[in-house]
Image (cartoon, grey):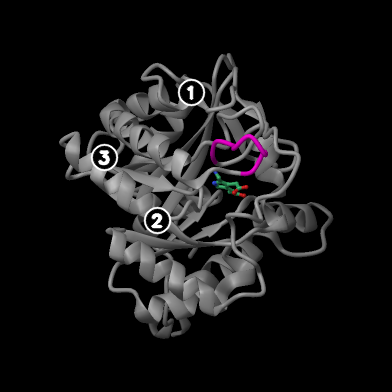
Amino acid sequence: MRRLVAEVRIHPADLILPVFVREGATEPIPLQSMPGVVQHTQDSLRAAAAEAAELGMGGIMLFGVPESRDATGSASLDPEGVLNAGIRAVKEEVGESIVVMSDLCLDEFTDHGHCGVLTADGVVDNDATLEIYGRMGVAQAEAGADMVGPSGMMDGQVAVIRQALDEAGHQDTAILAYAAKYSSAFYGPFREAVDSQLTGDRKTYQMDPANRREAMLEVSLDLDEGADLVMVKPAMSYLDILRDVAEVSDVPVSAYQISGEYAMIEAAAANGWINRDQAIIESVLSIRRAGADTVLTYWASELARWIKEGRL
Ligand code: PBG
């Protein structure tokens, strides 16, 4: 009866699996701070994507970990670069069965670890970064991305990427805008996942956790600029924001259950302090209940398997 009257559910098609692909890796490399998550080789990436498709998941979101980095993140534009090669491999593997998405940001590719290029004073140069984002979007679409996910929080990024995609003939490539993205301590384990070189912080471009109203401004700007989906990130400490956004957005709303959220539950469960599976389900249900249509979660494949087995 509880199942019959449940107000929200988790369905595999609502889930998006974030994955890391590492240049030069000959076998999957486990991440210490995210037990169960790896940096993939191109081959293990293909296998993960094929499994996601078989489980009927909504999509897969790729992050690249390059071997060499420079000041402008030029490897992000290289058609043979790790991320673009990964997109091509995944697209070849899954075809049209799930949505192939890619992170559109420079932080994995720059030697200073920021999401954009820097001015002489060492601060992120918003407009110079936009120009690169536009070219990055085209490179990813050309590699086969169905949807690009600009996550750098530069002002005007959605408009610039939309225009660049359209001009290059990629009108059908969609944009998942990281619209309300907060400057969060919970990204910690992700920085290990992408071998981040960042020494400072992202407070000049990511949002202040104190701000609620500002999220609505960020979302409305991205919608005006042509976002096809909008995202709130992180999820757990921002469920109020997610609810606000869900109430006004005419496009689908995503939430990203990020690395720190994953790590906290895994760590507490490993100590026997919480029931792992129940905590995972409860956390994702809360994100759906707050208003997310789709959820990016590192547990996506596991959840989809549980659903298939009728455990959920
Ligand atoms: C930026 C990006 C980050 C995450 C996704 N995209 C890191 C950041 O903004 O510092 C974090 C995801 C996670 O923590 O799981 N490319």
Measured Cα–Cα span from mark 2 to mark 1: 22 Å
> Which residue is located at x 54 percent, y 65 percent?
284
- Which of pointers 1 and 3 lies earlier in the amino acid sequence? 1
Mark 2–mark 3 distance (CA, rounded to whole Å): 15 Å
Q: Is 88 placed above or below 262 here?
A: above
| Secondary structure under the numbered disc 1 in the rendered image | helix
At horizontal 48% and vertical 65% (from top left) the residue drawn is 312
> Dividing the picture into quarters, in which one does residue 156 lie?
bottom left
In the image, what residue occupies the spot 58% across and 61% down?
Answer: 234
- What amino acid does circle 2 point to? Ala
Residue type pointed to by label 1: Ser
According to the picture, the residue beneath numbered tag 1 turns out to be: 74
Q: Main secondary structure of the magenta part?
A: loop
The residue wearing badge 3 is 164
**Residue hosting label 2:** 177
Q: Nearer the viewer, residue 73 or 25?
A: 73
**Is residue 35 visible in the rendered structure shown here?**
yes
Q: Which residues are magenta?
A: 116-123
Residues tagged 2 and 1 counted as in contact (Cβ below 8 A): no
Identify the image quadrant of residue 268: bottom right
Q: Residue 126: x, y in percent?
A: 50, 47
